[in-house]
Amino acid sequence: MHPIHDVDVLLLMSTALATKRRPAELVEIMAAMHLLRGSIPLDVDVAASFLRLSTEGLLVEEAGGYTLTAVGVALMGGVRNKRKAETAERLLAIRQELAAYRPKAEGQPIRLATEAVSAAILAHRNFLKAPGRNMLVPKPKAATDKPRPPGQWRRLDGGKRAKR
């Protein structure tokens, strides 16, 4: 698969994140992209990425949502084993897997209208402004980088010292 675009790598990772038990809706995939990158790419780029990855046989539309194919899941298998890796390292691993990937057959293309992608992006942004938060949105980190002070050691005997 050549050339490999950043949006393709991000779309694969976010689809794998959003589709745990069922095919993900477009809004859920946009939320996962926002979680991974901090922003969502242009709607034109996302629509083109859906088309590229689906013709390569990595994405499929089913049950009103989008999910990875068996080949896509196998491609992501090596990346899932790196649980302690940072997001940038995972995205680099996906890029390397895509560089080595050679499709055996052409898949069914998913042609998304840019208006549908724009609507999903706007729905996600509106949801972020609402009082309820999406589980895919990261929690803010503490303002200080200081480590917590060590706690007091507890004595198992209730604080009594042994007599000598």
Image (tube, helix red, strand yellow):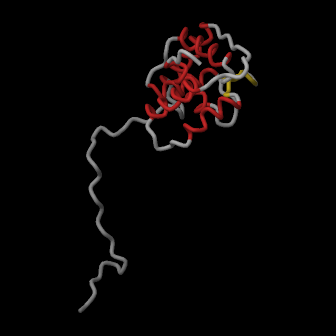
| Residue 27 sits in quarter | top right
Q: Name the quadrant of the C terminus.
A: bottom left
Q: Name the quadrant of the N terminus.
A: top right
Q: Given the current orientation, which residue lies at the most extreme bottom position?
A: 164
Q: Is residue 80 above or below residue 61?
A: below
Q: What residue is rendered at 43% in x and 25% in y? A: 38
Q: What residue is rendered at 53% in x and 15% in y? A: 3
Q: Nearer the viewer, residue 48 or 1?
A: 1
| Residue 143 sits in quarter | top left
How many circles with numbers are drawn on the protein?
Answer: 0
Q: Position of residue 116 (x, y in %)?
A: 62, 11
| Residue 18 sits in quarter | top right
Q: Nearer the viewer, residue 32 or 144?
A: 32
Q: Position of residue 44 (x, y in %)?
A: 55, 8
Q: Position of residue 84 (x, y in %)?
A: 46, 44
Q: Is residue 73 above or below residue 107?
A: below
Q: Is residue 146 above or below residue 128?
A: below
Q: Position of residue 54 (x, y in %)?
A: 67, 18
Q: What residue is rendered at 53% in x and 11% in y? A: 45
